[in-house]
Amino acid sequence: MSRSPLNLPRLAWRYLWARPMLTALNLMLLSLGLAAIGFVVLVSEQLEHGLRRDLGGIDLVVGAKGSPMQILLAGVFHLDQSTGNIPLATVAQLRAQPLVAQAVPISLGDSFRGHRIVGTTAAYLDLYRLDLAQGRRWTGPMQAVLGAEVARQSGLKPGDRFHGTHGLAGGGEEHEHAYEVTGVLAPTGGVVDQLVLTDLASVWEAHAAHGHADEATEASLEVSMVLVRYRSPLAAVMLPRWVNAQAGLQASVPALETARLLSMVGVGLDVLRGFGGVLLLAAALSVLVALLHAVRERQGDLAMLRMLGATPARVAGLIALEALMLASLATLLALGLAHGLAAVLGAVLAEQQSMRISGAWVSPWEALVPALALGLALIAAAWPAWRGYRLDVTELLQTPR
């Protein structure tokens, strides 16, 4: 008569939950540690991707004297105030440089329901390769094209009108002249979705009508910054020096400033990564101790399994399978928690109209999470599994109980 084969997975699952409180504690420690690692992977990759996307191939940002980091944050990522204004003639000077392929001016200072109004030229749309989902580009002053998020949140569509307010925060003084919406941009997933784009003359007209500027003359007109693309690699060496040598001008090199920005953000991510590592170490030690106790407590059961025909390798595999089941559960919980935390962070940043973080982002580096979990489980189970493998059945059966 043949005996039914030993169902190791079912037995391992029952052993795993024989002590539910201890299993829940180990599962929590392992899940939190893995979630911290997964969260760092998701956020850091999205930050780097977002910075590259929002730079849009910009090689240099020229603004008024001040902090290069502030110029970059204000002119490209729209997260800060500009350092001041520079003469409109600066744009012509930059375009006259043989090392410059493109120079796009922008004017900041107004907003609409917290979304920044950016005065610029049609070249801005070409610089970022922006497409229209509705309507058309502006053709004159006091016409505007809305970013996808601005249109979604405000409900505005081509043909509607709105009033901008002075300042980059809500609650500012409302301008008298209304903007007409001529188009809505297709979603990009970047900072442009949060912007209102209009002609440079719109900003000058709104401020002149509000008493913020004298009668508009070519000599008195100003812009906030100029976004520059190089014509050749030689410009990276020569152009920032030339800009900084000019009175009142400051060069901000995005490649350098984004590296500084990522290094500053990286400190917080490193702390979180270290916290996750500590939790994983604690979880591995806890699993190790729990499995060692389990082997000691189940010596009689394991001896009976051996008597029923289980080989030493199958007994050791039973212990390892228990740890792997725990790691698999922790992986599922950790990935869900990491994506959930990323979604919460994304919602908070969206309220502040800051960097875009999504909980739906999928990174190939997330494969590290199950690999790390399974690796730790096997390491933690190695000694207990060896103890189970080396059990002396004869000695156990002769031991009085």
Image (cartoon, rainbow, N blue to C red):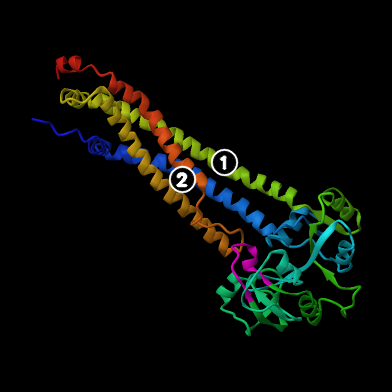
> Above or below — where is 237 with respect to 347?
above
Q: Tell me the kind of residue under disc 1.
A: Val
Q: Which amino acid does label 2 sit on?
A: Ala
Residue at mark 1 to residue at mark 2: CA–CA distance:
14 Å
- The span picked out in magenta is 184-196
Name the foreground residue: 353 vs 365. 365
Q: Is residue 231 above or below residue 321?
A: below
Percent from the top left, x then y, of residue 192? 65, 66
- Per the image, is 247 magenta? no
**In this rendering, position of residue 359 left or right of residue 377:** right
Residue 294 vs residue 191, the one in the foreground: 191
Q: In the figure, 235 relative to 353: above or below?
A: above
Q: Residue at x 67, y 60 (%)?
A: 79
Please state which of residues 34 and 110 is positioned toward the viewer in this rendering: 34
Whole-percent x, y for residue 397 in the image: 15, 17
Query: Taking the image as drawn, is residue 174 in sight?
Result: no
Q: In which quarter of the image is the N terminus?
A: top left
Q: Categorize mark 2 by other alpha carbons within 10 Å: few (<14), some (14-19), many (20+).
A: many
- Judge from the rendering whether residue 20 lies leftward or rightward of residue 348; answer left or right: left
Q: Position of residue 56 (x, y in %)?
A: 69, 59
* Element at label 1: helix
User: Looking at the rendered structure, which numbered label has been put on residue 132?
Assistant: none
The residue that appears at 54% across and 40% down in the rendered structure is 273
- Pointer 1 residue: 271
The residue pinned by badge 2 equals 35
* Residue furthest front in the image: 1
